[in-house]
Every structure is written in C-alpha cells, then in structure tokens.
Image (cartoon, rainbow, N blue to C red):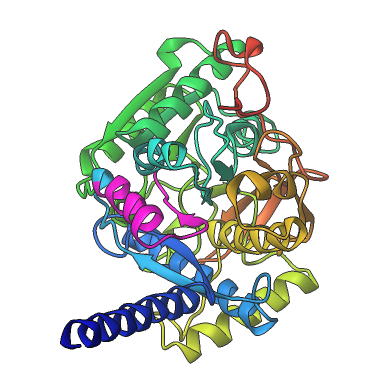
Amino acid sequence: MQRRSFLKQLTVSVSLAVAGMGATLAQAQETIKVGVLHSLSGTMAISETVLKDVALMAIDEINAKGGVLGKKLEPVVVDPASNWPLFAEKARQLISKDKVAVTFGCWTSVSRKSVLPVFEELNSLLFYPVQYEGEELSKNVYYTGAAPNQQAIPAVEYLMSKEGGGAKRWVLLGTDYVYPRTTNKILRAFLKSKGVDDKDIDEKYTPFGHSDYQTIVADIKKFAQGGKTAVVSTINGDSNVPFYKELGNAGLKAKDVPVVAFSVGEEELRGVDTKPLVGHLAAWNYFMSVKNPTNDEFKKKWAAYAKAKKLPGADKPLTNDPMEATYIGVHMWAQAAAKAKSIETDKIIPAINGQTFKAPSGLTATMDAKNHHLHKPVLIGEVKADGQFNVVWKTKGPIKAQPWSPFIAGNDKKKDEPEKK
C-alpha cells in the first residue's frame, strides 16, 4: 500500500511539475524577445548608446499599438563594450540562450563581421543601421545604413565639383579597420578614374580611441600647400572629438581645406566647440535639421522619450542618421512580421523584402526587393555654429544601394542578391 501511495504521489508530483513547465513555457511565449546589441561602454559608446535608446523607443511605440502578432515585444539589451570578439559571444547568447526573434545592432564593420557567422550559422536576423563599405551580402542581414554609392562616392563628387570647391588633392583619413580601409580602396579607384594621380592622394590611419591629432593636422596643412585639398574622414567613435578640436586649434578652416565626415553626426559634435568647424561637411541620408512633418513628429517623440527616461543629454535631444536607420529597421521588421504572420527567419524574409516606411528624411524608405539594402536619399550638410547641419546638396530622390562597388575589380560578376544557403 505504501509503495502504491508513493507511486501515486510521485505521479501527481510529476504531473504538477509538467504542468508547471507548461505554464512557464506559455509565459515565455507571451512576449516576443528582440535583441539590442550595441556598445554602451568603450570607444564606440559615444555613437552607439543612442541607437540602443531609439530602438527601445520604437519597441515601446509598437507595443503601445498592440505589439506584433498580438504579443508585446520584450527587448533584451546587451553591452559588447566596443570589444569586437565579444560582439560574437553576445550575439550567440541573444540567439541561443535568450531566443530573440531578431537583433538590432552593431556600428563598426569589424563588429558586424564578428557577428555575421553567428547569425548565418543560427539562421537569425540582424538589422544593421550604419553606413558601411559594402562588399557584403547576407541572407541574415538587413543593411539600413548607406552603401558607398549612397554616401562616399556622392560626397567626393560634390567636393570635386565647382559648387563643392573643386578639390584636386585628397587626404583619406580613417580609423584603422575594415570600413575605412575598404571605403578608401573604393575612393582611391574612383579618384583615379577621374584622373587623380597617386601623389595627390594621402592615406592615413589611426587606431580606435586615438586622441593626439596634432601631427596629423599639421601634415594635412602641409599637404594642402600643393593644391586645393579636401579631407575625407572615416574616423569612428570618440576619436572624432580630439580630431575636430585639433582642426579648430590649428585654424584649419572649411574654406581652405574642407573635411567631409562619414561617421560624424549631431551626436558626435555634442561635446565639441563647433564654431571653428563651421562649413566643414558630413554626408548622410538624414539630418536632424531637415524640414518635413514626419521629421517634426520623430524629433518630438524622441525629445519626449529622452525626457521621460531621463536619458543623458535629454535637455538637448538630438537625432541623427543611424538613429533614423535604426528606427526604420525596427518598424519594418514589425510590419513584415504582421504581413508574414510569423517571426521565423525564413518566413519573414520575403515579407521584409519590398517593405516601405515613411522615413523622417522626408522620403519613403524602401527595402530593396532583392539586395537587403534600403533605397535612400543622399544629403551633404555643412556644420553650423550650433552643431546642427545646413543641407547644401541632396539627390532628387532615393538612390538604390550598390553593395558591390563597380570600382572594385570583379564585382560586375557578383549578384545583387544574397546567396540562398
């Protein structure tokens, strides 16, 4: 009898445990987890922290309207701390342990290259919101920032034009990693196609976190004595602050040697005295200063969110291009999930392709039907004394991305869509 009673109790206990497990699983499935993978410390925190915040704002907006497929989105935020191998470790954690449906993250190309094999191996999706060097296509990545033909090439064409100052000599100055080096490889080939000699191109690199730009700025001034010179800056992260301070200290004015930056926006200029930098340039696909109702609403939402969450800098809320690209990506993924009635990678991809979203830039952003890149307008802005940008040139409409630059040999044979693996 005791044995029978014990077995009965055991059966009840197991049944309750299984029921409990079922309840736990049911609870786990009440939300859809999404990953946010940005450096919140280290050299890239100056640029990436606000991308985490704007992703959370977009998630809150979606949840306020009922979430996705009737479930609230639950963000899982991790900090890879500007440590490139750690990005891969954190990505694996998000996908395998936290079971996120999608991840929004990365800034530098070295961080994206670090996580790419993980997303492909585990067949998960990454939305990458920053301009980059191209030369990559993956089924598992959506690139909402600019390819070189949507930023770097138009910027250099502008500086070569009469309107942009007619530059003849070029300093290609960047942080020493894959994005600046590949972008400059493309730009060097482009400049040579326009008849620029190697002697008129000076290529320089500094490590992440570099802070002493005195010698480099002095070298730029000396190089500029040989003819009308422009600087193309692919410096990333907090090194931009000492670089721009040194430009000001050295009196290197835009009318003499204009600098066009690809990784400096409103946020990076927050800690810099911009008065000596008036007239220097940045090329992006969005500026906070663009005037249209969609952008007015975006800025208003961001200001309210920053204040409500007591974010650093909430007294002077700024928006920038990678924030816009992040915001577009989160909303496009949610729209695609609703369309596909699924969050599974292979089911949602066809629904993401061709997706549109009314962007703060003032134009409708369209995800290319094949190549996982957005069609984007190109804008060139001049730094103003208040740290904002005055748009001096823009394309008439959105430009389709060229992931494979025509200025790199052999790219004409590559397909404009990811390989199906």
Identify the magenta region: 86-108
- Tell me, yes or no, whether the highlighted magenta stretch contains residue 26: no
Q: Residue furthest right?
A: 396
> Residue at point 44% right, 73% down?
25
Query: Residue 131: in sight, yes or no?
Result: yes
**Is residue 106 shown in magenta?**
yes
Task: Tell me: residue 205, above or below residue 309.
Answer: above
Q: Nearer the viewer, residue 368 or 123?
A: 123
Left or right: 237, with 369 as reference point:
left
Query: In this orientation, does residue 195 appear?
Result: no
Along the viewing direction, whichever of 101 and 47 lies nearer the viewer: 101
Q: Which residue occupies the extreme front position in the image?
A: 1
Quadrant in the picture for the N terminus: bottom left
Q: Is residue 263 above or below residue 4?
A: above
**Residue 357 percent across, percent down from the top left:** 76, 59
Residue 337 lies in what quarter of the image?
Answer: bottom right
**Residue displayed at 80% across by 56% down:** 364
* Figure quadrant of the C terminus: top right
Vertical relation: 324 (above or below) 260: below
Q: Report the residue at 45% width, 80% height from top.
A: 23
Which one is nearer the viewer's eye here, 275 or 102? Answer: 102
